[in-house]
Amino acid sequence: MNQKIRKKIKRICCIGAGFVGGPTMAVIADKCKNLQINVVDKNSKRINQWNNDDLNKLPIFEPGLDKIIKRCRNKNLTFSTNVEEEISSADLVFISVNTPTKIKGLGAGKASDLKWVEACARQVAANAKGHTIVVEKSTLPVKTAEVIKNILESTNFEKEGSTNATFDVLSNPEFLAEGTAIKDLEYPDRVLIGGDCKDAIMALNEIYLNWIPQEKILHTNIWSSELAKLTANAFLAQRVSSINSIGALCEVTGANIREVSRAIGTDSRIGPKFLDAGPGFGGSCFKKDILNLVYLCQYYDLNEVATFWESVIELNNWHQSRIANLIVKKLFGTVSGKKIFILGFAFKENTNDTRESASIKICKDLLSEGAVLFINDPKVNPDQIENDLKIKETKSLLNEDVKNKSNNDGSWCFVNQVSCGFKGADAVVILTGWQEYQKIDWGNASKTMRRPSWVFDARSVISSKEITQHKLNFWQIGSGN
Ligand code: NAD
Ligand code: UDX
């Protein structure tokens, strides 16, 4: 067994240049000018986008990210596909690769697919030199660190001529939310480091200490750290399902969910955050992480606990179908051939990410009823929408008189300018809370829509007064008024 000779961290390699790896490493590079940060990814298209001179063409849209990239790129921050080379020269390797829900085999539909994490562990084992700290940044099921350790130690042991690589494994889950990633990374509520080796914990601690006060850097054992990440997401998602469930009750009783949220949110034990009713939670994390938690509970025979958390997802699925159904009902029970203008496709504002977006489910339901959807989003491109809806865009719709369409098959097209989507529309549906949707001139919009015209506001971005004075019918999430 080689002796672990620990050294000061100077070079960091991050495997995975995605929504987490890219922004997280950019902020570390910005805050720690003495460190060299090399982000690697096997996806060369993504790496080329990170290296694009035009900062509007970075693969990820996050407010403030472009400025940091401009300051650090090709100084102490690089993006490349040189995975093996950058691992071999790193003192610390972050694993920040995707961990989606398994689609087949044991645990399909619930357990996280760890094949990318395992591949990384094998790459690190094969290429690392000297002592290397391996940090789980990806969200992982409890005890994955054990798998990583096992692979590192056994693969390294088998190496021909056995190199002198030794390892410590830490868990350092990421709590950033998309759309506010830079702020969340610069001013986190806390940073969590889980591990059993004090020296390794302190080496990572020292990096964060460059901009985060010590009292916000928590140390735990490795399993608590892994479980805390799943639990945080489960609690947040649970709040969204809770408020959406009460929103449905408000709609039938004459109460208003914004008033209820304000009333309960002022209770300091409950707090005001994550109480906005909406079209149901989306994003790449909530559903996946809860399913993972459910799988873990079932594995340990805690079936009541599993059922409790599974209901958070079931409520969310029901809620999204409920919105699509009520749109159809309000439009006289049919949307076949009717033009519906969809505002927002990203799963929340200030991001171009559409993973698990409520818009996907709601648009698919409307398309299956034969609707003609005109879709706008300020940051999502039409190729992504095509990919998500799995229906080709019909660009010619833009030049057709849709209101006379007798076609029963659903179809859609992308609308670049919000002001160009209203003409002949039977309904407008707001699904993402982009700020610009608050500035729509409803007087002008209503003049060109087909009557009776509807506005469905699933994000509470507009006031009912503004809408109803223009003779538009109005439905707002959680409003029974
Ligand atoms: P992502 O899909 O955007 O990025 C992952 C990247 O890893 C991809 O570009 C992929 O090509 C690359 N990759 C996979 N295997 C590789 C390998 N062997 N070598 C080189 N590159 C490889 O994923 P993401 O959204 O950044 O999420 C990463 C992890 O962070 C997940 O576990 C996720 O649950 C967690 N997380 C995500 C968020 C979020 O907001 N997206 C927040 C917190 C935690
Ligand atoms: C989440 C966690 O917040 C973050 O800590 C973790 O690291 C990754 O997963 P993210 O999915 O990026 O972040 O966004 P988040 O702000 O949590 O929103 C998730 C979904 O819930 C979005 O669809 C959002 O619109 C919805 N939401 C959120 C509501 O409907 N109401 C709310 O009050 C808050």
Image (spheres, rainbow, N blue to C red):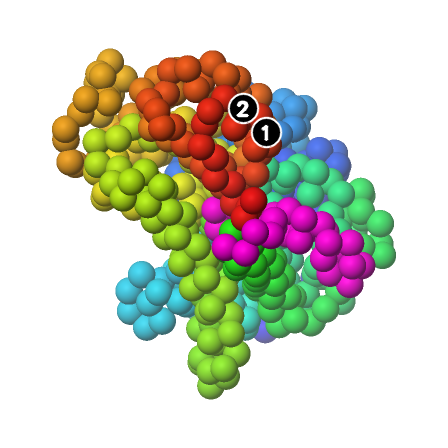
**Side of 327 where 149 appears, left or right:** right
Horizontal and vertical percent for residue 471? 46, 24
- Quadrant in the picture for residue 350: top right
Q: Is residue 100 visible?
A: no
At label 1, counting other C-alpha atoms closer than 10 Å, the crowd grade (few under 14, some 14-19, many 20 or more) is few
Horizontal and vertical percent for residue 243? 58, 56
| Nearer to me, 470 or 371 | 470
Q: Amino acid at mark 2?
A: Gln
- Quadrant in the picture for residue 418: top left
Residue 80 to residue 95: above or below: above
Q: Magenta residues, as a range?
A: 252-281
Residue drawn at point x = 50 percent, y = 55 percent:
252
Q: Main secondary structure of the magenta part?
A: loop
Q: Which residue is mark 1?
A: 465
| Nearer to me, 350 or 55 | 350
Q: Is residue 433 visible?
A: yes
**Side of 389 where 2 appears, left or right:** right
Mark 2 falls on what kind of element? Answer: loop
Residue drawn at point x = 41 percent, y = 48 percent:
323
Q: Amino acid at mark 1?
A: Lys
